[in-house]
Amino acid sequence: MRVGIFLFGGVEMDDAGAGPPASTERRFSQEVMWHATERILDMGVLSDKLGFDSFWLTEHHFQYEGYEVIPNGLLIGAILAERTEKIGIGMAFNVVPQWHPLKLAEDFSTLHNVSGGRAILGVGRGTVPREAEVLGAKIGSFDNPDKAVADKLNRQQFEEGMKVIKLALDNETFSFHGNVYDFPPPGIPDRGGTVQELTLVPRPLYPYETWQAITSPPTLDQVPRDGWGGVFWNNHHSVAKARWEKFADTYESAHGVPLERGQHRQLALAVRVEDSHEEAMESVRDGHDEFWKFLGPYGWSRGYLNPDQSPVEPGMIPTLEQSMQQKTWLVGTEDEVAEQINWYDEQLGLENLMLFPAMPGDHYDKVAEQLQRLAQNVLPQLG
């Protein structure tokens, strides 16, 4: 089992929790936000020393609220590559419609090569309109009729963007002419002729993996057909199992080859370990509630189920107890958390696991302690 660490990368907060202040009322200085960036790098170095297989950052923009303060994880990843030796460096996730696809390909290749082949291409379609609309993308939702047009455009931007990125990364020369992107555009003069093809510089010197976030049925169908890996998070355990198996069925149907146990699939789980079950719940509650205060309005709980197994209402903000019942938050002693991960391994076959040990607002000394507990007392118990 390959185990990675995923951090949102936010500032330290002393007032995290379900109550006030509202998410949008917080503002932090540039010094505080840059301190968080430096501490995130420290966590990556520590994760490497502790033997984790990968370290995942996330891409977000304009977040004065302090939740996710790294806009370019590829750039930060290049710094991390120079400070580490073995750990893979991934993005969970680069929002492809917010990028010029050739710039994303160039930057990823640079990180991959400077790290000696340790970069992981993590891609997604995005969730935050404030970021997407400013950076030239659209955000919709397949289950929201009012946003159907935006969702269709977003998927078109993503699909064409990924075709461009893959062509550029994997071929000596390439061209692409679609509805959204046209590379190279016709009629560009160059040395007595016109440009017909392009060559990406640099291209990857090493093989690389591609992983995409899966949060909707259309994406669950698309990712295995494209042939790369899918990441599953914030789903009731039965939903996770159903989607895990659907992914494998679709992959085999598209490629004529059955997937091996856990192949091309990755489960993300929020975790908190303490000396007792009660201490763990107390330790994580405010961060859990801050997480949902921030992300609940974006529909992040759509993978949760009610006790009768019906989908929860849109925008539902769960309690910690509800998240633990869903088995999306694993909370307890090291033995309890290891037991729950091994349960998932029995249910799904976990070849790739992404752990989320830092809640919004957590101090980084606490995050370091969690990393050490996980590496020293949980990982040795995993099957």
Image (cartoon, rainbow, N blue to C red):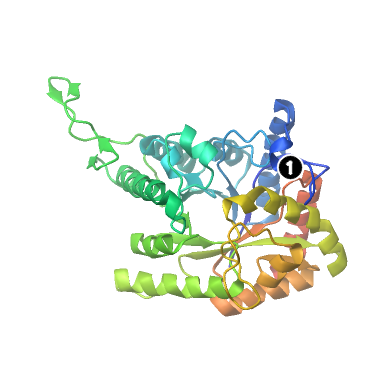
Residue, x 57% and y 45% (percent of image)?
58
Query: Is residue 351 found left or right of 31 in the rendered image?
Result: left
Quarter residue 187 falls in: top left
Q: Is residue 56 left or right of residue 13?
A: left
Position in image of residue 103 (x %, y %): 40, 34
Residue 42 shown left or right of residue 59 in the figure: right
Give coordinates of residue 35: x percent, y percent.
73, 33
The number of numbered discs placed on residues in the rendered structure image is 1
307 shown above or below 47: below
Q: Return the residue nearer the eye: 95 or 5.
A: 95
Residue 263 seen in the current view: yes
For this rendering, which residue is in front, 205 or 160? Answer: 160
Q: Pick the residue in front: 225 or 152.
A: 152
Based on the displayed image, in which of its 4 quarters is residue 311 positioned?
bottom right
What residue is at 64 percent from the left and 47 percent from the top?
8
* Residue drawn at the location 69% of the way across and 38% of the way down: 24
| Residue drawn at the location 43% of the way across and 55% of the way down | 145
Q: Position of residue 156 (x, y in %)?
A: 34, 48
Return the residue at label 1: 22
The extreme front residue here reads 146
Q: Is residue 57 above or below residue 143?
A: above
Q: Quadrant of the N terminus?
A: bottom right
| In-image side of 237 versus 99 (left or right) | right
Q: Quadrant of the C terminus?
A: bottom right
The kind of residue on which mark 1 rests is: Ala
Label 1: few (<14), some (14–19) or many (≥20) C-alpha neighbours in 10 Å: some
Estimate the x, y position of residue 209 in percent, counting from the top left. Answer: 44, 55
Q: Is residue 86 in view from this perspective?
A: no
Which secondary structure, mark 1? loop
- Residue farthest to the left? 192
